[in-house]
Structure formats: C-alpha cells, structure tokens
Image (cartoon, rainbow, N blue to C red):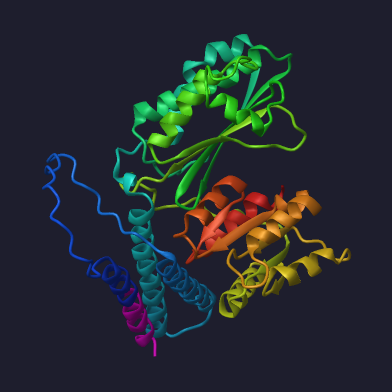
C-alpha cells in the first residue's frame, strides 16, 4: 500500500509538467519569417521562461494543495508505532512529497522570475556593510539603530554592487530626514523572507510622510516644492529595484509617524539557499483559528497543531471565521488561513480585520498553494505578514506562527 502513493504522485507531477509544456507547444498560425536574431553571448545563456495562464496557475495550486495534504498526513503518521518496513516506506513517501514540491517550486521560479538567474547577492551581508559605512554619521546624529535581520536568508537576484548602491541611497534618504528631526532619532531595519521574495524595510522617526508623497519622490524636479528633499536618492533606489524585477514603495504605518520604505526583491534561483533551517521555536499554549476550504488540509493542520499542544478551531471559509472572531468569549492568538476560498478568501478576511481588529490582523499567517499569480505574490509582499507555501514542512508552519504569536 505504501508504494502506490509515490507512484500516483509521480504520475500527477508528470501530468502537470506535460500539461504546462504542451501549452507552450501549441501550433500557431503561419507568419512571415522574422529576421534571424543574433545568438546570445556564450557567457550569458538565455533563461527559458514558461508563461503561466489562469488555468495553468489553477492546476499548480491544486497540485500544491494535494501535496500539502499528503505531507501533513505523513507528519501525523511519523509519530505512530510502525514496524521497520512501514517506517521506511513512510520515510520514503515523505521524501517523494518533498521532491515533488521542489519540482513545482523550481518550475515556478523560472516562470515568475527569469531574472532570478542573474548574479546573486547576500542581503544580510550587504545591509551590514551599508550600515557600517554610515556608522559615523549614525553616531553623530545619535540615531538608535534597531535591526531584525534573520540568519539563513536566501540570496536575492540582484548583483552585490547594485544592491549595495540601492540600500545605501535608501539609508541616505533616511539620514537626510533624521538630520532634520528632533531627538530621539530611531532607524528600524527589518528583513523578511516571504514566498519567492525577500522584503527589506527601513523606517525612520523623521517627519510623517504619507504614502501620497511617493509620486513626488519618484519624480525629481517635476514639482516646484521639494517637500523635504530626498527625491534623488529615493528615485534612483527605486530605479535600481525595478531593474532587478523588484519593487520599492512607501508603506503606511499606524499612528502616521515617520516614513517606511519597503524594497521587495526576487529570490535568486542560483544563490545558495541554506538547507538547514533554524529549529522552530518552542511555543507557549496558543489558541489558533485555522481557515481552509480544503477538508483534508484543514483536518491535517488541525491535528498537527493539536499534537503540538495548542487549542485549535478549524473552519472552512472566511465568513465562518468572522463569526468565530466576533464571539467575544473566545480570543485567538493566531489566525492561520488559506488565501483562495470560494466564499470569503483569506485576503478579504485579513483586509476586513485591518479595519475592525488591527491587533488581530498582525497575527495572521497565510498558507497557500497559489504561488503562480502575480496578484497573490504582490499581496503577500505588501501586507508584511508571514506566509507558508504549500506543501510545507511542519517546522516552517511552527516558525511562522511563532513570529506573530507575540504581535
């Protein structure tokens, strides 16, 4: 019985790749021959990009959901008493699920970020170098620097010198604002890995800067009033981010104080991603609300989290989650939700709670197999909440929950 499950999933993965590749080979109408392009340079082979349409994205999402369910079930069975033969079969099954997950992830990286084959760089090392370069100025201004730069960050698809120049210009932008601000002066630097991207944010305690100011900042010399300067640094940093298929934008923060600049860059498909992740934190007893319309994924996650010692309530859509959250007698420490659900999805649930219960919205963890849509990726990057991509390791889920449990 243990052997047919990996066999069937091998067929499923093969069928997905055959479907996607077949779509690329669909016959096209005859056209006049185009001029023969020049061959690329020998040291810069082109990266083959696979275009994913809506139906292809749905197939990938469905496959990731099934892989997530089987991975969670194997995690549940791993604590059972099994004879050696069945224990080996279970271990093999778990390994096959992870290999299938790697295939879908690598396929997605080539589809979403063909620029991911560019020269990689280590964001942690570059940030450390940039802060060290401006250490004297930071001390002269009496700036308190608070940094959250985790170990084991993946490399980003941006050459080191370019990333250094981009972050240095953003630091100079913050220093310009802090120089004009009254003490105490604070600079917060945070880095977060979210799905296929790495997000770097810099917040300074200078004068309030609403998101509407972004139009002025990206258009130097366009407006008569500069409104505080910094346009050149901001605009050049933004151009550098865009040239690496990233984004740079202002993000609103509660209280309307200071300014936060957020840079999102694609992970490199060439850079060394550490194989060993840090051990998940030992969490206190938590009340967790799980929201997922997929019955098998919902039940498996509920059982896994209960086995970890938490109280879990599981519902199958966002509307029911709203009802549970409205019950004042039950408070939840964390909300773990899928994104794509037929009634009220995870994004709409989150956005509704931002208005109604902003403190609870900060304790959201998104779990999704919908990795192919640009809209999904942008939302996960911009909301700033941790996300876990299906199929996931239990340690990934526990770490994500731990990162928001004290928010």
**Residue reaching furthest to the front:** 32
Viewer-proximal residue among 223 and 173: 223
Residue 147 visible here:
no
**Residue reaching furthest to the top:** 140
Residue 152 lies in quadrant: top left
Viewer-proximal residue among 309 and 174: 174
Q: Is residue 403 left or right of residue 106?
A: right
Which residue is at 62% across, 48% downward?
Answer: 383
Region rendered in magenta: 1-13
Q: How many marks?
A: 0
Viewer-proximal residue among 291 and 40: 40
Query: Does residue 252 lie above or below 213 as drawn?
Result: below
Viewer-proximal residue among 149 and 68: 68
> Which quarter of the rendering shows the N terminus?
bottom left
Which residue is at 13% across, 55% downward?
Answer: 33
Query: Does residue 357 lie above or below 326 as drawn?
Result: above
Which residue is at 73% across, 61% downward?
Answer: 286
Query: Does residue 306 lie above or below 189 as drawn?
Result: below
Find out whether residue 8 is within the magenta segment: yes
Which residue is at 47% across, 68% downward?
Answer: 61
Q: Position of residue 127 (x, y in %)?
A: 47, 29
Residue 48 visible here:
yes
**Residue reaching furthest to the bottom:** 1
Query: Does residue 232 lie above or below 398 as drawn?
Result: above
Q: Position of residue 197 (x, y in %)?
A: 46, 47
Q: Is residue 399 left or right of residue 275?
A: right
Q: Main secondary structure of the magenta part?
A: helix
Q: Position of residue 322 (x, y in %)?
A: 77, 66
Find out whether residue 249 is within the magenta segment: no
């Amino acid at each position: 019985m243990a052997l047919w499950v990996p066999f069937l999933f091998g067929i499923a993965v093969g069928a997905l790749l055959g479907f996607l590749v077949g779509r690329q080979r669909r016959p096209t109408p005859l056209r006049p021959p185009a001029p023969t392009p020049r061959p690329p340079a020998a040291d810069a082979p082109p990266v083959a990009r696979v275009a994913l349409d809506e139906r292809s994205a749905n197939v990938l999402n469905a496959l990731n959901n099934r892989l997530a369910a089987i991975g969670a079930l194997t995690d549940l069975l791993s604590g059972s008493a099994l004879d050696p033969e069945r224990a080996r079969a279970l271990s093999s099954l778990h390994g096959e699920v992870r290999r299938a997950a790697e295939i879908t992830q690598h396929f997605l990286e080539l589809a979403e970020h063909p620029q991911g084959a560019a020269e990689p760089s280590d964001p942690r090392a570059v940030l450390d170098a940039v802060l060290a370069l401006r250490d004297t100025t930071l001390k002269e201004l009496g700036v308190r620097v608070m940094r959250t730069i985790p170990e084991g960050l993946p490399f980003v698809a941006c050459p080191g010198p370019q990333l250094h120049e981009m972050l240095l210009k953003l630091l100079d932008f913050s220093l310009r604002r802090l120089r004009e601000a009254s003490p105490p002066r604070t600079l917060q630097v945070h880095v977060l890995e979210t799905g296929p991207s790495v997000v770097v944010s810099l917040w300074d305690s200078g004068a309030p800067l609403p998101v509407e100011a972004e139009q002025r900042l990206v258009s130097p010399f366009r407006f008569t009033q500069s409104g505080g300067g910094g346009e050149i640094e901001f605009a050049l940093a933004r151009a550098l981010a865009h040239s690496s298929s990233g984004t740079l934008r202002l993000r609103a923060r509660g209280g309307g104080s200071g300014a936060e600049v957020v840079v999102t860059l694609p992970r490199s498909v060439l850079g060394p991603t550490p194989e060993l992740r840090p051990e998940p934190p030992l969490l206190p007893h938590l009340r967790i609300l799980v929201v997922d319309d997929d019955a098998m994924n919902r039940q498996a996650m509920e059982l896994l989290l209960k086995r970890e010692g938490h109280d879990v309530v599981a519902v199958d859509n966002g509307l029911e989650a709203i009802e549970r959250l409205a019950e004042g007698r039950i408070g939840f420490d964390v909300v773990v939700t899928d994104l794509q659900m037929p009634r009220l999805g995870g994004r709409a649930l989150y956005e509704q709670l931002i208005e109604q219960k902003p403190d609870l919205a900060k304790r959201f963890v998104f779990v999704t197999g919908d990795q192919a849509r640009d809209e999904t990726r942008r939302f996960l990057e911009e909301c700033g909440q941790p996300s876990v991509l299906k199929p996931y390791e239990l340690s990934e889920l526990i770490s994500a929950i731990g990162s928001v449990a004290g928010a």
